[in-house]
Every structure is written in C-alpha cells, then in structure tokens.
Amino acid sequence: MAKRLFSILIMVALLISAIGCATAPQATSQQEAQPQEQATAAPNEPEQAEATEPPAAPANVVMLDYYIVGANDTDQRPLVEKAINDYIGPRIGANVTFHIIPWADWSSKAVTAIEAGEKIDIFFTADWFHYSKLVSEGLLTPLNDPDGPNGNLLEEYGQDILHSLNPAFIVGSQIDGVNYAVPTNKELAVPWGFVYNVAIADEIGFTDDEAAKIKTPADLEPWLAKAKEKHPDIYPYLTDGTIGFMPWVHGFASSISDYVVNMAIAPDASGNWDETILVPFETDWMKSYLSTMRDWYQKGYIHPDAGLTTFDTNQLMNAGKFFIEPMPLKGYNIKAQELVIASGNPDLKLKEISDAAVIGEVVSEPEEKIVVAA
C-alpha cells in the first residue's frame, strides 16, 4: 500500500505538469475508434474493430494535499482542481487539492505545517528554499534510496523522469547520493537584474536607454530621488534584502546565506578570476553597499518594514506602489510578464534591466523542485 501511494504521488506530479503544459485536447484512442455518423467505409475496407471499453475506475481514490507557492488564491481553483481530478482520477486513482500559500507566509504556514506532521503529500521546495533543511530533518521521502524502506521509487515508477531529464538535474539535486525531489526541467543559470514600474518610469523620464546605463547603486540613486519626489507616499526601491548588484555567486552554498560564504562571480577588469572563498560581510564592497542602503533607507527610498521576515514585496508590486526591485530574471522580459499576469492588476506594466549587474547564477541544483512529503 505504501509503495502504491508513493507511485501515485510521483504520477500526480508528472500528470499535473503535463496538464499545465498541454495544448488543445486531442482525441483519445477511444474517441478515434468510434465511427462518425457521416463517415462511409470504402467498399473493400475491412470493418473497423469495436472500440475497447475504458479501464474501470480504481475502487479507491486517494486525496492528495498539494502545497504550492502562489501570489493569491482564487475562486477559479476549485474548477482547476475538478478538471485535473476528472483526468487523473480514473487513470491513477488519485485526486488532488491545492493549498496555495504566498511567499511571505510559506515558512510560517507551509514549513511549520510539514514540521508539525500535518498531512502534506506533495510540497514545493528549492535548493535555495528549505530543501536541505527539510531533508536534514527527515521530512522528505527518499526517492531512490536502494537501502531505504521504499527502494528506488524513481526507477520503479518514475522512468519517464529519468528518461526526460538531463542527468545533471538528477545528480545535481542529490544529497549524499539520494534524491528527495523531482527536479524541474528548467534553467541552470539565472541572470540577476531589476524589474521596474513602467508608469513611474515614464513620469520621470527613465527610458530604455537610461535603464541600460544602470551599472552601480550610484547610477540608480538619482532616479530613486525623482521617483520619490513624484510619489512621496511610495518607497521606490522595493527590496527584501536582495542585492541586485552583488558581485558574488547567488546560491553559492545551499541553505547558507550568500553573505556568509561565497566567491567572485566573474573575472576582474584585468581578466583575473580570484576564486578565493571569502566572507562577503567582511569585504569593503559590502561595507560600502550597506552604507548606501542605510542612506537610502533614511531618505525614504526603502520601506521601513523591509528588514522584517514577514515583509512581502509582492503586495506593493502588485499594487504598482514601487519604482524598481532587484530579483532573478529569465531573459527576454519573461519575468516581468509573469509578474504582471500574477498581479491581477490590469494597469501594471513592468520592464526588466537584465544587463545592469551582469550577474548570473550557476547552481548545482534546479531552482525549483516538487517533493514528496514523508
């Protein structure tokens, strides 16, 4: 029974991914086999074989609780769940219910829930977002531990995962040779930069040409001043502590702050690449940067709650109450478009500065993973 449940969990994760990426529905083999009312057979064509009966629905349908990050829950969720369940229920004997939790509440609601032993079957995580911590606490199911109680679930039930993913995703997301997550087949490198509010940019003359000139905090500060003057009630530099200009590797050591241990992300102006492991907090660059952030905070460019773990930048962004925010991007203005869609604000327009800091993140694990809860 336990192995059947684990196999269902893996298949649900795959099927939901497939549904989300599907194009217009195609006719099923059964539909194709049924005769059309107006169709006529060729004189010598053999009679079409009768369509086979669809497989009987499983006697027991398991309800799975799927915890996932989302900016907002919606009244459309039940309709989405029904469509998914109508598809996967007869096929694998499972239904799913989504628990959509905002980023700002994930630690206090989702992580706390799994640590408290609440029923959670499929759970979002990432190499930079509680993955190692949850594994160390024994809260995630090993997916391919031959010596574990469940054996190698990936080989037994997830052959398509192994066949479709580059081996780097599987090996790169392992801890001590074991996978506790189904890696997402997506980017291995993440460019860092900024997303800015087009409405305010137009008001202060921040054109695409001006955006391309932003290389340092000093380049950005005059525009923050203009945005603050135009809108005294907003805090133009929206940040939760993310450093868009950082000269080190983002996500250098999983589950450890980028500012505690790191190394240079690129060669210096002379072409020399210093690969010395360092403590960013002890560098002159960081001292200068923190001094600048303190100055911006005092000038009202940064929100007074930005230092709190409960501070949610999404709310201010969705309302358009900001000028610019540092964040990981995806190139081609894709991230900005995603944020606009997720905001639910038809008046919000965003653009990216993807070459400002010329910083990319090369990670050993995929950015996102779907995991099976213990």
Image (cartoon, grey):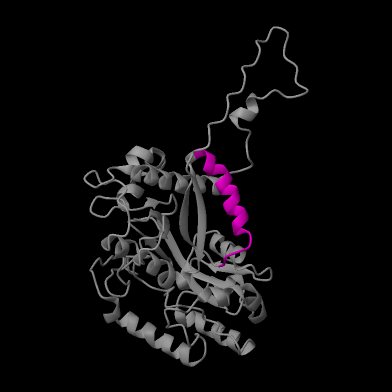
View extreme (bottom): residue: 298
Instruction: Name the residue located 57 percent from the left edge and 53 percent from the top edge.
Output: 81
Report x, y in % for residue 109: 43, 70
As drawn, 29 above or below 58 = above
Q: Main secondary structure of the magenta part?
A: helix
Q: Which residues are magenta?
A: 72-91
Residue 274, position as x, y percentages in the image: 26, 67
In the image, residue 208 sits, relative to residue 23, either above or below, namely below
Please tell me whether residue 78 belongs to the stretch shown in magenta.
yes
Q: Is residue 85 magenta?
A: yes
Front residue (pair 325, 64): 64
Residue 221 in percent (x, y) is at 51, 84
Q: Is residue 304 above or below residue 13?
A: below
Judged from this view, the residue extending furthest toward the front is: 59
- Lateral position of residue 128 relative to residue 220, left or right: left
Residue 357 seen in the current view? no
Q: Which residue: 38% across, 55% down?
A: 366
Using residue 120 as the reference point, say whether residue 205 is left or right of it: right
Can residue 225 be seen?
yes
Rendered position, 287 above or below 213 = below
